């Protein structure tokens, strides 16, 4: 996958996650207080990982040419790690 393809896919995924988190945040209002607190903790953790993913995207946008060949793999692995945590949190919250 080229750098530009990776960046575009990452942007799309970030937008999707942001929308989903906003929906889940609105949904939290209907929960009982104790459940709502746990829900918000899980959502806050997911947003923290989303911030890290955004930083990784910014790094990818700054890297070009041969540097992408070297740094791209590391960034993609880090992205995959953040992606797994975010998607698990979102799945837990929608269950």
Image (cartoon, rainbow, N blue to C red):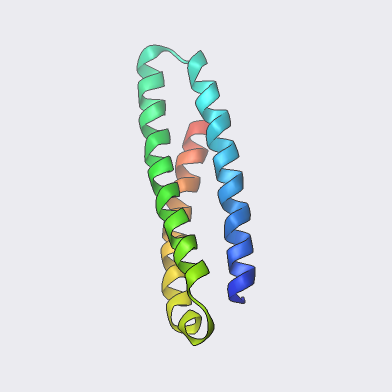
Q: Is residue 62 visible?
A: yes
Residue placed most toward the observer, 15 or 94: 15
- Residue lying at 50% horizontally and 47% vertically, measured from the top left: 87
Q: How many marks?
A: 0
The spot of residue 49 in percent (x, y) is 40, 48
Instruction: Give the residue drawn at x 49%, y 32%.
Output: 93
Q: Is residue 61 above or below residue 42?
A: below
Quarter of the image containing the N terminus?
A: bottom right
Q: Nearer the viewer, residue 34 or 72?
A: 72
- Eyeballing the image, is 85 above or below 5? above
Q: Residue at x 49, y 83 (%)?
A: 69
Task: From the top left corner, tell me how far across and down residue 60 is, in percent.
Answer: 49, 68
Left or right position of 68 against 23: left
> In the drawing, does residue 89 fall left or right of residue 13?
left
Report x, y in % for residue 57.
Answer: 49, 61
**Residue 66 in the image: above or below residue 8:** below
Name the residue located 39 percent from the left edge and 19 percent from the top edge.
35
Q: Residue furthest front?
A: 62
Farthest bottom residue in view? 66
Looking at the image, can residue 95 be seen?
no
Residue 76, x across and y down, in percent: 48, 68
């Amino acid at each position: 996958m080229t750098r530009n393809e990776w960046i575009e896919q990452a942007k799309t995924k970030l937008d999707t996650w942001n929308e989903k988190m906003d929906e889940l945040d609105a949904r939290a209002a209907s929960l009982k207080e104790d459940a709502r607190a746990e829900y918000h903790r899980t959502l806050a953790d997911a947003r923290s990982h989303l911030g890290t993913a955004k930083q990784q995207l910014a790094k990818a946008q700054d890297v070009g040419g041969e540097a992408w060949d070297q740094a791209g793999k590391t960034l993609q692995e880090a992205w995959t790690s953040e992606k797994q945590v975010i998607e698990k949190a979102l799945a837990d919250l929608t269950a």
